[in-house]
Amino acid sequence: MDLHELLHILEHALTDSLKAVPFLFLAYLLMEAAERYQSAKMEKAISGLGKAGPLVGAALGCIPQCGFSASASNLYAAGLVSRGTLLAVFLATSDEALPILLGVSTGRGMILPLLLAKVVIGIVAGYAVDFAMHRWGRPRELFDLCEDCGCEEEGAGILKPALWHTGHILLYIFLLNLGLGLAVHLLGEEVLGAILLKDSFLQPFVAALVGLIPNCAVSVLLTQLYLAGTVSFGALLAGLCSGAGLGVAVLIKMNRSKRENGQIVLTLYLIAALCGLAVQLLF
């Protein structure tokens, strides 16, 4: 790897990380406001968005960006959105895959089916999970975002802590993006294509596993492999459904319960893989 390639990877890592800043900052402002000014009306309005949580989450998640999934993870960690809403956002999240498909004539016809499939999967799965959690799960509780870091000072308001947390998680995301960018560059598309089991019915399971890698470059890679004929549409759907951008990384970083994190990631993977397999077998 020469200096030019390294600088290119650094540039992409920084660009991908900065895209998430507005979403992260708004999320932390909401979280700080909920902590500082805990009113019953505010918590009720934000927490899961009521019964519309998975519907709104899936609709917002399909917008071509990967920052909203990171915001949803922060809000879930703070107890402000439901698990079903979080999974709806993750499953529907769209990023660089759509511009790539739009730029290729053979891929444009797949954009609408892909978006519709991801949104429908997100909505159905989100409501199913929320229904299960309502019946069998315990309600989540708000936690003090600044309890561990001590960034909150008397009279500091909500702006300073929100900026501090945004900068803190931004550094974490940048380092993660940089490491994953180097890994993808060193492995190369040919090796990853072989790993993805071309022409195998198991391909959606492998693609969904690859999609869990928390980096927008993974969705780019899967889309390019689909356009090259290496992966099926079902496998592409599986990989893009599990590919929640930075959401999974932020969830693991911010949510205190490792058990919850494992359950959410496993649920995300299984839904993505099984839906991708169903599409591959039916179409």
Image (cartoon, rainbow, N blue to C red):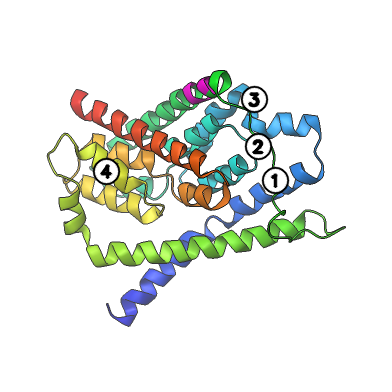
The residue to which callout 1 is attached is 31
Q: CA distance from mark 3 to mark 1?
A: 17 Å
Residue 73 position, x and y percent, is 55, 44
- In this view, which residue lies farthest toward the bottom? 3
Few, some or many residues within 10 Å of mark 1 (<14, 14–19, 20+)? many
Determine the CA span between mark 3 and mark 2.
Answer: 11 Å
Q: What separation in Å lies between label 1 and label 4 (alpha carbons)?
A: 34 Å
Which amino acid lies under the numbered mark 1 shown in the image of this protein?
Met
At a point 60% along the width and 52% down the height, the residue shown is 24
**Nearest to N terminus: mark 4 or mark 3:** 3
Spot occupied by residue 202 in the image (x, y as percentages of width and height): 19, 36
**Few, some or many residues within 10 Å of mark 2 (<14, 14–19, 20+):** many
Amino acid found under the numbered disc labelled 4? Ala
Disc 3 marks which amino acid?
Gly
Q: Find the magenta span and give its range.
A: 128-132
Secondary structure category for the residue under label 2: loop
> Secondary structure under badge 3?
helix
What mark, if any, has residue 107 been given in the picture? Answer: none
Dot 2 and dot 1 residues touching (CB under 8 Å): yes
Q: Is residue 107 visible?
A: no
Q: Residue furthest right?
A: 155
Residue 148 position, x and y percent, is 68, 56
The quarter of the picture where residue 2 lies is bottom left
Residue under label 4, please give it.
207
| Residue named by callout 2 | 80
